[in-house]
Image (cartoon, grey):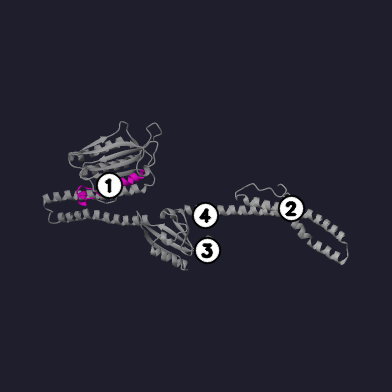
Amino acid sequence: MPRATVPVRRLTLAVAALSVPVVVTLVVLVALGEIEAGVAGLAGLVILAGLAVPVRRHLASLAALGTHVDALADQGATATAQPAQPAQAGSTAELSWAIGRLKRSLERKSGELEARVGADEIILDSLPDPLIMLDDGLRIVRANLAARNLLDQNLGGRDLAAVLRNPAVLEAAQAVLAGAAGRTVEFTLPGRIERTLRARIEPLSTRAADGTAAVLALHDLTAAKRSEQMRADFIANASHELRTPLSTLIGYIETLSGTASEDAEARQRFLGIMHDQASRMSGLVDDLLSLSRIELHEHSPPDGRVDLATVLKDVADTLALDARAKGMTIALDLPPAAPAVVGDGEELIQVFQNLVDNAIKYGRPNSTVTAKVTRTERGPGPLSKPSTEGVVVVAISDQGAGIAREHLPRLTERFYRVDAARSRELGGTGLGLAIVKHILNHHRGALTIESQAGKGSTFTVYLAATPPAGRGGA
């Protein structure tokens, strides 16, 4: 480091200040006649000259130390290079080195603190449940990523009442901050999709450095509540669906055992009805077992290669008799190159058999059911991202009465029927489209439904395509 320049005025003032006692002493001695004025003046000059040298060095050292401290302050906390130390030796140099060491120590501790805070933020943002930190005044100190995503706003510094306008939650939070034990509140959060949440408010034993006095944790119960409701509906519907044919069977069995035991004509007619009801129960049980089996491994998608042209031809051949019974035809519109998809052949046969069977049941007599296959770059839902091979699209269209728009979102619910009486008359179990939905979920595919009153309906299936045979296909 270059030698620091000492201003003349500052040096003069320092030397003058240090020489005051000496000058006063000389003046007193002259006044008492102890020494002559000339000798006293010469002695004063010598003393002043003698003081100037060490004072100048000392002031230069202090100036260099100040420059060094300024340089340390100007450096960023993450700077690795240290400013050069002052060239002077002695106490100021040692002090300079001590200041440098102190700065490096503070930088290291500051870096460690920042890293720890950053790690805490990462951990909090990685938690799946929303967390909100509150101060004594119900003001949000900070919130993790899940909370910000749930409430869709910047939460820091806002009042809890402005974010969660639920009296039960606010009352519980106020009570906890006033000294009560932790509390749990269940509430609904309005929005485009209403959510059911459980709030747990816990006080901190010691207030945090950032002012946090309590933590509000939210747990989303929406899926569990829906699942619980679906389970209850499923049990009620399944019981009802089974009770009706069972009651019919029991009634006819009692009749055949009693008054109709000798009536051959009635017996024959009753046995036909009993066969139909038993077949209906058997179909319902088969569909329930099929649905349960699909849901069991829905989390692991299939990786086989399925030739859709073969699947659709097999389905058309299987249902050709049912179509001819209504004077209907099944038309396949296939591209020249047979499309292949990633999937399970038996499950996809079940998908298209359900869809084509529904088209025949609900289509007008003497009409045509069409199965058209095309390809596209992407589809809805899981297939929304473009892929190298693209997506295979299969549209099953009928020429029936159509379905009212309000029913479309619920068609894939278990046991949901637009016309329950007609569905039972046609032999439907109310599970066909639910099975289709779960199979397509298993395949990471998608289903869309379009319908127009008086013109018919189109059920469109989207499946991931596979590479052509011989180019990496399964």
Residue 71 appears in view: yes
Decide which of tag 1 and tag 4 comes sooner along the chain.
4
Magenta stretch, main secondary structure, is helix
Give the x, y percent position of residue 89: 75, 51
Which circle, 2 or 4, is nearer the viewer?
Answer: 2
- Inspect the image, locate mark 1, and give the three-letter code of the amino acid beneath it: Gly
Q: Quadrant of residue 342?
A: top left
Q: Is residue 19 above or below residue 454?
A: below
Q: Which residues are magenta?
A: 418-444
Which residue does the image show at 39% across and 58% down from the upper left? 197
Decide which of tag 1 and tag 3 comes sooner along the chain.
3
Which residue bears the numbered disc 3?
207
Q: Residue furthest bottom?
A: 179
Packing grade of label 1 (10 A; few <14, some 14-19, many >=20) is: many
- Badge 1 element: helix
C-alpha separation, residue under disc 1 versus residue under disc 3: 58 Å
Which residue does the image show at 59% across and 52% down from the upper left? 111
- Inspect the image, locate mark 2, and give the three-letter code of the amino acid beneath it: Val
Q: Nearer the viewer, residue 334 or 435?
A: 334
Which residue bears the numbered disc 2?
8
Instruction: Decide whether residue 137 is among the magenta residues.
Output: no
Which circle, 2 or 1, is nearer the viewer?
Answer: 2
Which residue bears the numbered disc 4?
120
Kindly indicate whether the residue at mark 2 contacts the one at mark 3 (C-beta within 8 angstroms): no
Which residue bears the numbered disc 1?
432
- Inspect the image, locate mark 4, and give the three-letter code of the amino acid beneath it: Asp
C-alpha separation, residue under disc 3 versus residue under disc 2: 56 Å
| Lateral position of residue 63 relative to residue 398, left or right | right
